[in-house]
Image (tube, rainbow, N blue to C red):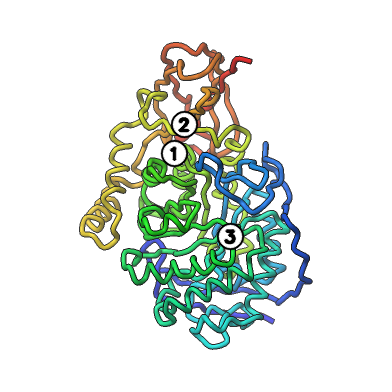
Amino acid sequence: MSFWIRCSTSATRKCFAHSVAAALLATAVSITAVPRAPAQQGPADIGIVGSPERPVYPLKASANNRYLVDQNNTPFLMVGDSPQYLSTNLSQEEAAAFMANRRSYGINTLWINLLCICEEAKTFDGIVPFLVPGDIATPNPAYFQRIDDMLRVAADHGMVVLLDPIETISWLDVLRKNGKSKAFEYGQYLGNRYKDFLNIIWMHGNDFQSWRNAADDDLVQAVARGIRSMDAIHIHTVELNTATSGSLEDPSWAPLIELDAAYTYFPTYAQVLTEYNRPNFKPIFMVEANYEFENVGPDPEGGSPQNLRRQEYWTMLSGAAGQLYGSAHSWKLERGWEANLDTQGVLQLSYMKNLFVSRQWHDLVPDQTHAVVTAGYGRVSCLVGKFVAGVSKDPDALWTKVFGSIRKYFGVGSITGNSCATAARTSDGSLVLVYMPTIRAITVDMSKLAGTTTARWYDPTSGEYADVKESPFANEGSRVFMPSGANKSGDGDWVLVLEARTPP
């Protein structure tokens, strides 16, 4: 039997009108509930070089509060996809196929909304979340059993689920009608139900544009407090407003979260560094930026493969603990999603992961003062990216609208128009990584490396290395590096990899 489900909404993603119709050919598949073990372990990454041992969930913040670790304190690099409609639009069999595909690219995290971004939020086969429409005090056992089963499928595939309990695009008005007491009790219901599902990170918000309204903020936080009152083991995060924000911009969320979600459609280094430099910092991840196949064409912010690479490497070399990829096909999971999984964007995401997980990525410190890369990094471009993002915090402010138009029509502060080269160095000087969006000569202070240094270029479009002529180099003086030409895709972006032989 085929099902054609329409989830209509007036909400937007990226401030563009989106149809959120979800269409699938699906069959409900039942699976037997599996016993809950003290720790859930998933398979190691498939086809990904240098992956760590299987993580033991739940995840937590590292001792220095800069990245995530599992229960064995093994660093966990978050590399995710954003199938927000998965729990309502896919059968368990389809979800398993989707997750197996994503796992093959090294993806270990999925953003899933517990309630669909739509008016009815029912599953493809007609199961509604609440027995009384709009009354969050009447959870439908059949619907939440479906969520249980999806979480177990994710655990079977070693996936962490960023689970949004009641996203704020379509459901904030429902929260308003239910009130703070019911919101807290709904959170208690979820916290009690899911406290033993170890592969969860609770994620609140979703284009939470009105968080500056204290009443709205209190409602969303009431759900979080309800969850925490019953579940003390899972970490939390929150996505605030588009077009650029970080969780800690709302100080009232600081006691409720352990993970800081950066969200931006500007050059990603700007928001990540803002979060990294906070005195009350927490591990940072890029929860949302441009998605593949969205806003492409003349838009300088579109999700082209090149723009995605810039977002990803800027993020990782600015102090982030990971990030989520997204696609026009995977976030909505409309009809035909199966034919649009193996894309250039997700393949190149796996190359990014390969580069970092095989090294001490969690020890990298952003080169914010340009002590390592001393010239050629693009001073003006770096400053423009930070400035335009910085004056665009409030989505309703006049400056945000003015600079939004300048960015769109003239490219100032856009991703495509930004050539800032970001760099990071491990504290022991054993590793320096530099991402260059365009071909240029850069100057590196070699004394910042701990010993004789091997230099290679990493092609982010193919995952291949090329030795730098005359490498290795002494760790003294300054040296100029410049790629010999375009990468395999014909673009100008490269990663310079400098690895030093450290003294015994």
For label 1, the residue is: 318
Local secondary structure at mark 2: strand
* Mark 2: amino acid: Ala
Pointer 1 local density, CA inside 10 Å: few below 14, some 14–19, many at least 20: many
Give whichever of 388, 252 is nearer the camera: 252
Q: Classify residue 500 by image quadrant.
A: top right
At a point 47% along the width and 58% down the height, the residue shown is: 256
Classify residue 257 as left or right of residue 232: left
Disc on the earlier residue, 1 or 3: 3
Q: In the image, which disc is placed on residue 286?
A: none
Q: Position of residue 35 (x, y in %)?
A: 78, 65
Q: Classify residue 26 by image quadrant.
A: bottom right
In space, the residues marked 1 and 2 are separated at their CA atoms by 7 Å
Disc on the earlier residue, 3 or 2: 3
**CB contact under 8 Å: marks 1 and 2:** yes
Classify residue 420 as left or right of residue 8: left
Q: Is residue 487 visible?
A: yes
Q: Is residue 268 visible?
A: no
In space, the residues marked 1 and 3 are separated at their CA atoms by 30 Å
Give whichever of 77, 95 is nearer the camera: 77
* Mark 1: amino acid: Ser
At a point 38% along the width and 32% down the height, the residue shown is: 368
Q: Position of residue 121 (x, y in %)?
A: 53, 78
**CB contact under 8 Å: marks 3 and 2:** no
For label 3, the residue is: 232
Q: Position of residue 231 (x, y in %)?
A: 59, 63
Q: Which is closer to the viewer, label 1 or label 3? A: 3
For label 2, the residue is: 424
At a point 49% along the width and 37% down the height, the residue shown is: 490
